[in-house]
């Protein structure tokens, strides 16, 4: 076994140990990417408005910083259709373990799992989801955290959400990270079967990865496109451009001070379910309407 394989094996063992201490086992069906890691922390989460929902049935997937092997890049928040009725989205998150920042991929499941205690906004305030709930085959939207005013949606409610601590930290653990541990309910969700991101979500990530303006080394933590109303479409009038600065300008470490990441296709994805993914219906371009968190 070569030195590189030993290093990767050691890091994987360290990550598994971290998950075990937290009570987060990694079942074979979980969408956990243990091979993706970086040597320095991701930038703070930028502050942005949520674009209007394109049509009933869509769910909000918050934006996050991803890693391309040499640089962080922003994956804009967007509206997507779930793979099937009854599923909720658990966002991806970064966690410090084994001397590196380790990537944990997002997934669909009937319940919200642990996402590092990260406050992504728009209902994802660190634990659980305050943006809505399923009632049989209908999803009810909380209008206090979702921009659903442009579409005739009757399955809505208004619930005020109090967030005791607001910050823009984008990772768990390590120096300056969020100090959060999974709840008992989140631990139970970790043991459930998970469904990986949809085709449209993957297309969205690929489009973000190939966009130079979304790389942290270029935008210094302030992406040119914060969010979109349509997954993978960065050139229509449903995009949300730069928002408010999240703090001081992000500057990555100089020189080769980061650990290499494995390629994205080396994720350990969850198996597809038998149900076919719901396809994006055709829709007209919507006027850009922003809603502050």
Image (spheres, grey):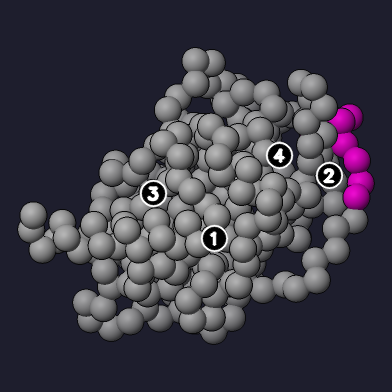
Residue position marked by numbered label 1 in the rendering: 22
Magenta residues (range): 151-159
Residue 54 seen in this snapshot:
yes
Q: Residue at x 69, y 47 (%)?
A: 185
Q: Earlier in the sequence, mark 4 or mark 1?
A: 1
Alpha carbons under labels 4 and 2: distance apart: 13 Å
Local SS, label 3? loop
Q: Nearer the viewer, residue 24 or 32?
A: 24
Choose mark 2 or mark 3, whichever is in front: 3
Alpha carbons under labels 1 and 2: distance apart: 31 Å
Quadrant housing the C terminus: bottom right
Residue position marked by numbered label 2 in the rendering: 142
Local SS, label 1? helix
Kindly indicate whether the residue at mark 1 contacts the one at mark 4 (C-beta within 8 angstroms): no
Q: Main secondary structure of the magenta part?
A: loop
* Residue 235 x %, y %: 49, 45
Q: Earlier in the sequence, mark 4 or mark 3?
A: 3
């Amino acid at each position: 076994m070569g030195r590189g394989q030993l290093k990767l094996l050691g890091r994987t063992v360290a990550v598994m140990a971290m998950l075990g201490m937290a009570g987060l086992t990694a079942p074979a069906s979980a969408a956990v990417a243990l091979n993706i890691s970086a040597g320095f922390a991701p930038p703070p989460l930028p502050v942005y408005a949520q674009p209007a929902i394109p049509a009933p049935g869509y769910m909000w997937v918050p934006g996050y910083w991803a890693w391309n092997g040499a640089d962080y890049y922003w994956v804009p928040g967007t509206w997507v259709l779930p793979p099937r009725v009854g599923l909720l989205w658990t966002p991806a998150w970064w966690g410090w373990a084994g001397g590196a920042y380790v990537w944990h991929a997002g997934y669909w499941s009937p319940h919200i799992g642990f996402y590092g205690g990260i406050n992504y906004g728009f209902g994802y305030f660190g634990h659980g989801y305050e943006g809505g709930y399923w009632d049989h085959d209908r999803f009810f939207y909380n209008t206090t955290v979702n921009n659903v005013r442009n579409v005739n949606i009757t399955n809505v409610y208004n619930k005020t959400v109090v967030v005791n601590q607001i910050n823009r930290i984008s990772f768990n653990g390590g120096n300056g990270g969020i100090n959060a541990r999974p709840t008992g309910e989140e631990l139970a969700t970790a043991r459930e079967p998970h469904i990986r991101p949809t085709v449209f979500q993957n297309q969205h990530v690929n489009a973000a990865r190939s966009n130079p303006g979304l790389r942290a080394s270029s935008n210094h933590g302030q992406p040119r496109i914060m969010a979109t109303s349509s997954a993978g479409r960065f050139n229509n009038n449903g995009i949300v451009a730069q928002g408010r600065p999240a703090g001081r300008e992000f500057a990555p470490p100089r020189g080769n001070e980061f650990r290499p990441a494995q390629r994205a296709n080396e994720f350990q994805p969850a198996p597809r379910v038998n149900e076919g993914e719901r396809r994006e219906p055709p829709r007209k371009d919507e006027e850009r309407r922003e809603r502050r968190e």
